Image (cartoon, helix red, strand yellow):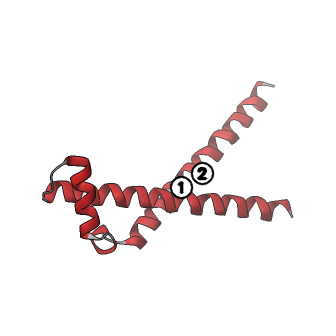
Amino acid sequence: MESAMFALKFKVWMRRLLKTVFFILLSIAVARSLGNPEIWINYDFAEKVSNYIYADVNAETIYDVYFYISFITVIFITVIIYILVVKLIKFIRSY
């Protein structure tokens, strides 16, 4: 009885670990495909955000804003792709 409970908990733990690893690998792939944030984020927009957050615009705050915007974008895109993939897998497994 105890080994069956352990096997069930281990299975749940492994599934969560694999989902977490999949999410991390997916976010790395999304971040690598987007490239440098200086390319796809407008400098004027970053300057306005930097001025709003820090009330100062210099090189350090601009690069902080580039990082924050790219990080939020990568997480957002990764969550959307992750949810779609999980739903697709559930749909495929149901048939």
Residue occupying image coordinates x 65% and y 62%: 84
**Residue type at the position of mark 1:** Phe
Residue at the spot of label 2: 19
Q: State how many labels appear.
A: 2
Residue occupying image coordinates x 61% and y 44%: 16
Q: Which of the pair 28/58 is nearer the observer?
A: 58
> In which quarter of the view is residue 90 placed?
bottom right
- Residue at the extreme top: 2
Residues packed near mark 1 inside 10 Å, few (<14), some (14 to 19) or many (20 plus): some
Q: Are marks 2 and 1 in contact (CB under 8 Å)?
A: yes
> In which quarter of the view is residue 31 placed?
bottom left
Residue occupying image coordinates x 59% and y 59%: 82
Name the image quarter holding the C terminus. Answer: bottom right
Residue at the spot of label 1: 23
**Residue type at the position of mark 2:** Lys
10 displayed left or right of 79? right
Name the image quarter holding the N terminus. Answer: top right
> In which quarter of the view is residue 40 placed?
bottom left
Q: Which of the pair 63/48 is nearer the observer?
A: 48
Q: Which of the pair 45/5 is nearer the observer?
A: 45
Q: Is residue 64 visible?
A: no
The kind of secondary structure element at disc 1 is helix
Residue 87 in the image, given as x and y percentages of width and height: 71, 59
